């Protein structure tokens, strides 16, 4: 059997958002070891708080303090914690309805094992030693048999309230390219670019997908394209990417390889960024041992006529 290709991939980026008055008060409160909810017009207290009533869609902003103790309403045991989760040892994910709240908050519950967890058990917040104004300021919940402390009736007004947060988003996964893209990757190791032709519309797709996105039929006929092509459109990148050793500004472009009916994207080099243009004729530049072109550079040919690539924009 042919080798099944696979590779670990990571999609990671910082998500930045501003905070309205409700979320600002909630997160700032966690920093100060205060748990705040928001009261709806019919008297329900929602924790975590939201800015609009989920039933009536009315804007709500009446903040109310609740206790850091509560009751487990449901739970699931996590036998193998993953990177970035609240605890490094097995724990329970639990929905906890804090005393004074009408909704439940999802967080980790530190317990010695699943036999120690039950619906209806009493728990309390374990605060993080260092708090910055995030849900992780609650390190976890822990079992608790004592009385619920009386909330102090905090108004939700704080010195130096948070106005925005940056939340890292990350997805780790294993990618297996399948038959069509495996053939495409294998061809690249020989410095060839191979697409597949649709048996119905006769278009050649690069990279191949195993099926025509227009006709919905399977593709199998391999067609070698390029290596030269035409820049159909492009963008100038001015923000340096993490772990990418390319100085900004640089150009990323869609390139229609000769013989292909779908443009692929690649970096343009060998020319000042402000001289890249639509219709520029380019060719691949390979580095020793690479499995794909490092970038594309101008061929020196006259620019392609717009009519020859307008359908590929």
Image (cartoon, rainbow, N blue to C red):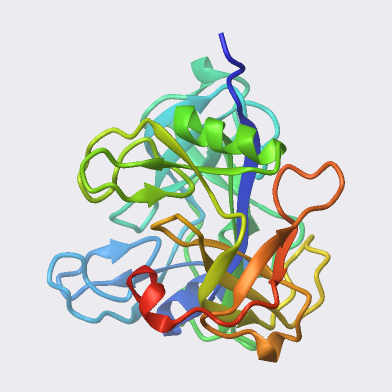
308 horizontally vs 237: left or right: left
Q: Is residue 257 above or below residue 308?
A: above
Whole-percent x and y of residue 299? 69, 72
Looking at the image, which residue sits at the far right? 288
Q: Quadrant of residue 32?
A: bottom right
Residue at the extreme bottom: 274
Task: Report whether 288 appears left or right of 296.
Answer: right
Picture quadrant of residue 39: bottom left
Q: Against 269, is 191 above or below?
A: above
Identify the residue at image location x=31%, y=53%: 103
In this rendering, is residue 306 above or below 201? below
Residue 102: % across, % down: 28, 55
The extreme top residue here reads 1
Residue 5 picture location, percent across and down: 60, 26
Quarter of the image with the N terminus is top right
Question: Residue 38, can we see it?
Answer: yes
Comparing 17 with 193, the one in front is 193
**Residue sitting at 29 percent across and 64 percent down?**
45
At a point 38% along the width and 60% down the height, the residue shown is 47
Q: Nearer the viewer, residue 280 or 153?
A: 280
In front: 163, or 299?
Answer: 299
The answer to whether 24 is drawn above or below residue 136 in the figure is below
The image quarter in which residue 230 lies: bottom right
Image coords of residue 117 (percent x, y): 48, 24
Q: Nearer the viewer, residue 119 or 245?
A: 245
Task: Decide if residue 32 is in sight here.
Answer: no
| Residue at 70% over, 74% down | 298
Q: Quadrant of the C terminus?
A: bottom left
């Amino acid at each position: 059997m042919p080798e099944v290709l696979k590779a670990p991939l990571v999609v990671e980026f910082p998500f930045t958002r501003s905070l309205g008055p409700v979320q600002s008060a909630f997160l700032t409160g966690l920093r100060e070891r205060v748990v705040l909810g928001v009261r709806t017009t019919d008297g329900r207290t929602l924790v975590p708080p939201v800015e609009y009533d989920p039933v009536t869609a009315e804007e709500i902003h009446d903040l109310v303090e609740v206790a850091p103790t509560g009751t487990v309403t449901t739970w699931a045991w996590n036998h193998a914690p993953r990177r970035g989760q609240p605890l490094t040892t097995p724990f329970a994910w639990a929905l906890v309805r804090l005393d004074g709240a009408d909704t439940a908050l999802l967080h980790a519950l530190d317990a010695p094992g699943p036999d120690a967890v039950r619906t209806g058990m009493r728990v309390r917040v374990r605060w993080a030693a260092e708090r910055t104004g995030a849900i992780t300021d609650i390190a976890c919940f822990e079992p608790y048999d004592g009385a619920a402390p009386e909330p102090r009736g905090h108004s939700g007004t704080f010195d130096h309230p948070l106005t925005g947060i940056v939340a890292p988003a990350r997805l780790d996964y294993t990618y297996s390219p399948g038959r069509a893209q495996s053939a495409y990757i294998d061809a690249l190791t020989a410095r060839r670019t191979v697409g597949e032709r649709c048996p119905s519309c006769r278009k050649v797709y690069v990279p191949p997908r195993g099926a025509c996105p227009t006709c919905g039929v399977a593709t199998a006929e391999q067609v070698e394209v390029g290596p030269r092509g035409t820049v159909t459109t492009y963008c100038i990148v001015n923000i340096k990417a993490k772990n990418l050793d390319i100085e900004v500004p640089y150009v990323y472009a869609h390139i229609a390889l000769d013989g292909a009916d779908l443009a692929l994207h690649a970096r343009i080099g060998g020319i000042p960024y402000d001289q890249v243009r639509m219709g520029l004729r380019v060719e691949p530049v390979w580095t020793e041992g690479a499995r794909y072109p490092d970038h594309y550079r101008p061929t020196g040919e006259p620019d392609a006529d717009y009519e020859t690539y307008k359908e590929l924009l």
